[in-house]
Amino acid sequence: MSSLADHIQSADWKAEKHVPVIEVKGAAKKGEPFEVTLSVGKEIPHPHTTEHHIRDIQLYFKPEDEKFIVHLGTFQFAAHAESVQGANEGSAKCEPIVTTTITLEKPGQLVALSYCNIHGLWDNAQKVEVS
């Protein structure tokens, strides 16, 4: 039987356009909010077309020395230039970039998943120290 983990792809985001990039703004301090920016296509642009786009980015936190992961949020990108006039004729599209604010009580890893409608799920992780 297949598990979800069997279908998640990983790579270096500097060489692969589907990998989510995690950027922490400033130092994380225990109990204090800080910003995290998630994006896809930072080094190699990802298409944002009706036919080929990033549908969402999910953010998780794996606390150090804990078994379970915490789902922090799912950020959906719903407009891909679709229109009644045809594909890519629409007046709006979303860029797969989002900034969110989180608060942590301990160090761990931020884990992001991005979903491309053609190429599936991609992941990335970044360790976060909390002072």
Image (cartoon, helix red, strand yellow):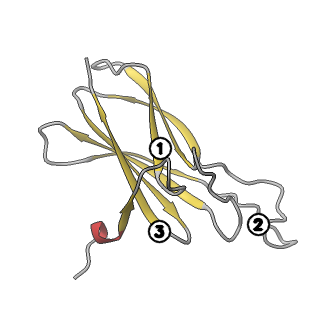
Amino acid at the residue labelled 1: Val
Mark 2–mark 3 distance (CA, rounded to whole Å): 20 Å
Rendered view: 52 above or below 10: below
Amino acid at the residue labelled 2: Glu
Q: Nearer the viewer, mark 2 or mark 1?
A: 1
Q: Nearer the viewer, mark 2 or mark 3?
A: 3
Mark 2 secondary-structure assignment: loop
Residues packed near mark 2 inside 10 Å, few (<14), some (14 to 19) or many (20 plus) = some
Give the residue pinned by disc 2: 82
Task: Tell me what residue is drawn at x 37 percent, y 19 percent.
Answer: 27
Mark 1–mark 3 distance (CA, rounded to whole Å): 16 Å
Rendered view: 97 above or below 83: above
Task: Tell me what residue is drawn at x 55 percent, y 72 percent.
Answer: 118
Q: Quadrant of the C terminus?
A: top left
Amino acid at the residue labelled 3: Gly
**Mark on residue 21?**
1
For residue 114, side relative to residue 125 (left or right): right
Residue 4 in the image: x percent, y percent?
A: 30, 69
Task: Tell me what residue is drawn at x 27 percent, y 19 percent.
Answer: 30
Residues packed near mark 1 inside 10 Å, few (<14), some (14 to 19) or many (20 plus) = many
Mark 1 secondary-structure assignment: strand
Give the residue pinned by disc 3: 120
Mark 3 secondary-structure assignment: strand
Residue sitting nearer the eye, 56 or 129: 129
Q: Quadrant of the N terminus?
A: bottom left
| Callout count | 3
Sequence-wise first label, 2 or 1? 1
Residue sitting nearer the eye, 16 or 37: 16
Mark 2–mark 1 distance (CA, rounded to whole Å): 26 Å
